[in-house]
Amino acid sequence: MITNKSNTNKIVFFGTPAFAVTILEELKKTGVMPALIVTAPDKPQGRGLTLTPPPVKIWAQENNIKFIQPTTLKEGSAEKTSQIFELFTESWDLFIVAAYGKIIPENILEIPKHKTLNVHPSLLPKFRGPSPIEANILNDDQDIGVSIMHLDKEMDHGPIVVQEKIPIEKIGTWPVEAPTLENIAAHTGGELLAKMIPDWISGKIIEKEQNHTKATYCKKITKTDGLIDLNNNPYANYLKICAYSGWPGTYFFKELGGKNAGKNIRVTIKQASYQDGQLTIKTVVPEGKPEMSYSDFLRGVK
């Protein structure tokens, strides 16, 4: 196991996607390495449905960190006596959660001596839920930041430990595509977490209850959310293109002409810009075809 001698706290890290990997990398820079990683099971991906490990599992393997991939952490699971047995039998100092993607029961959250911290990419209580990055962009809300909270049994409800606002100057342009904003938020959250862990462990940080009356929420994104009506407000459409540029992407349906007249195909937007009140679609991927310029696509469907 790769560790730093100054890292004397026994930490378990719960996380799954690239966002969590970035946070792990920021912790690693300061010598904070988890003793155990909990991540999601491998999933089939792509047209061939190839069983693919989550990014955090790959990071754990590269850094020689023990990991488990339970399908559930719920009470009564048969896995409680197998995969997650170590969570209950070891003496842990701290649990850290970053985009794990599964419900963590309260009896697990309360295991470590110094409780469970969660890295959430919004300025809570704003945008509680699974898609805060996308919500910031969709709402054209430039009040962006990262919160580290003491996780409790309710969704993004626990007391705030520390927060940091991300200035627009650090982002560069606005609106920005979701993967770019997510990467900035992950680095910010990882750096903030690494700095505050010693003070949290030593009891120097006093957590603060959220103002629950000001809580707003964001939903779980589905593939159908990416559908765009090109007749809608151009700026609202551009915000949507930016927000969903990672997943699920944005698309519209177009009726073909000529010998295929009457047939509708899905057209995925790949590149677009917005200027002077106008949305300009630059490149698209028509269903069953490679990426092409939007102008070439329009000529082909006439």
Image (cartoon, rainbow, N blue to C red):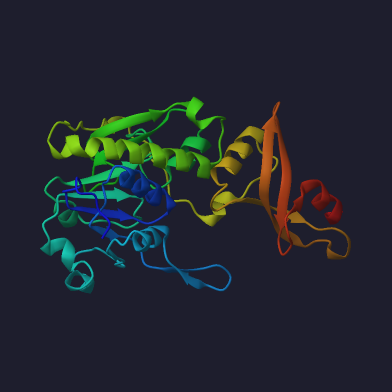
Q: Is residue 100 left or right of residue 248?
A: left
In depth, the one of 114 and 120 nearer the eye is 114
> Which one is in front, 190 or 212?
190
| Residue 130 at x, y percent in the picture | 39, 48
Which residue corresponds to the image point at 58% horizontal and 70% vertical from the top-left? 47
Q: Position of residue 33 (x, y in %)?
A: 26, 51
Tell me residue 176's x, y (percent): 56, 36
In this rendering, position of residue 267 left or right of residue 53 = right
- Position of 23 with respect to 88 (left or right) is right
Measured as percent of width and height from the top left, residue 258 is found at: 88, 61
Instruction: Name which residue lies at 42% across and 43% down.
Output: 218
Give 45 or 253, whichever is nearer the viewer: 45
Residue 174 is drawn in which quadrant? top right
Numbered disc total: 0
Q: Please identify the quadrant where the N terminus is shown.
A: bottom left
Query: Residue 274 is drawn in which quadrant?
Result: top right
Is residue 26 at least partly visible in the picture? Answer: yes
Which residue: 55% across, 46% down? 244
Q: Point out the residue furthest to the front here.
A: 5
**Residue 148 in sight in this render:** no
